[in-house]
Amino acid sequence: MSCLLVSPPLGIKFDLLCHLTNYYIARSFQKNWTRGFLIHLPVPRPSRDDLKLAAGDHYLHWKLSPFGEPLATILFTLLPAFDFNIKTFVKPSSQYDGPAIFVIGQVLPDYISHIAADALQAVGERHHIDPTPFITLLDNFCQDFYRPHTPTLKPHLTLTIPLGCNQ
């Protein structure tokens, strides 16, 4: 029995039944979260170590106007081939007057960290704007990562995963 393959935007085929993380990551690239002055640039790619593993980045800009510089940038880097806890780093951007926030892990966190939220709160205070809608949108983005793309199966149905996935 063959494994279910899904093609994200770049046409890369990932094995989604053998690796649940592949399902989450490949599905995360099928929706663009650009809303108002939040710009979302999804960048799917296969893992460097295993071409059947999905990987990639979600790059987000928070802007005050469509043509202005970003107030902050957030990069979610998904690296399923590496086993480590999700890390969040904040540093001044090398290109813009605002923080660059990096969230690196095998998967997305359930919600953005306090470190990232505090950095965004500081940006809001500096520009006299409320960052809560932007932080909420980022939390929704993270929580959507674990939501099923299709309706869940009814309880009386069973799901069997083929044993030949690793062949």
Image (tube, rainbow, N blue to C red):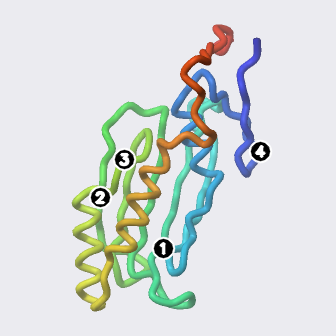
N-term-proximal mark, 1 vs 4: 4
N-term-proximal mark, 3 vs 1: 1
Q: Quadrant of the C terminus?
A: top right
Mark 4 element type: loop
Q: Position of residue 5 (x, y in %)?
A: 73, 31
Q: Is residue 65 above or below residue 28?
A: below
Between the C-alphas of marks 2 and 4, the distance is 31 Å
Give the residue drawn at x 74%, y 49%.
Answer: 10
Q: Is residue 79 toward the left or the right of residue 109 in the image? A: right
Q: Is the C-beta separation of discs 1 and 4 under 8 Å?
A: no
Q: Which marked residue is nearer to the observer: mark 3 or mark 4?
A: 3
Which residue is the site of mark 4? 11
Give the residue drawn at x 39%, y 81%.
Answer: 71
Comparing 44 with 25, the one in front is: 25
Q: Which marked residue is nearer to the observer: mark 2 or mark 4?
A: 4
Between the C-alphas of marks 2 and 1, the distance is 16 Å
Comparing 90 with 150, the one in front is: 150
Q: Which marked residue is nearer to the observer: mark 2 or mark 1?
A: 1
Q: Is residue 46 above or below residue 153?
A: below
Q: Is residue 151 toward the left or the right of residue 10 in the image? A: left
Q: Position of residue 119 (x, y in %)?
A: 26, 71
N-term-proximal mark, 3 vs 4: 4
N-term-proximal mark, 2 vs 4: 4
Which numbered circle lies on residue 61?
Answer: 1
Q: Position of residue 22 (x, y in %)?
A: 57, 34
N-term-proximal mark, 2 vs 3: 2
Which residue is the site of mark 2? 89
- The image quadrant of residue 6 is top right
Mark 2 element type: strand
Give the residue drawn at x 36%, y 47%.
Answer: 110
Which residue is the site of mark 3? 109
What amino acid is found at the position of numbered circle 1 in the picture? Answer: His
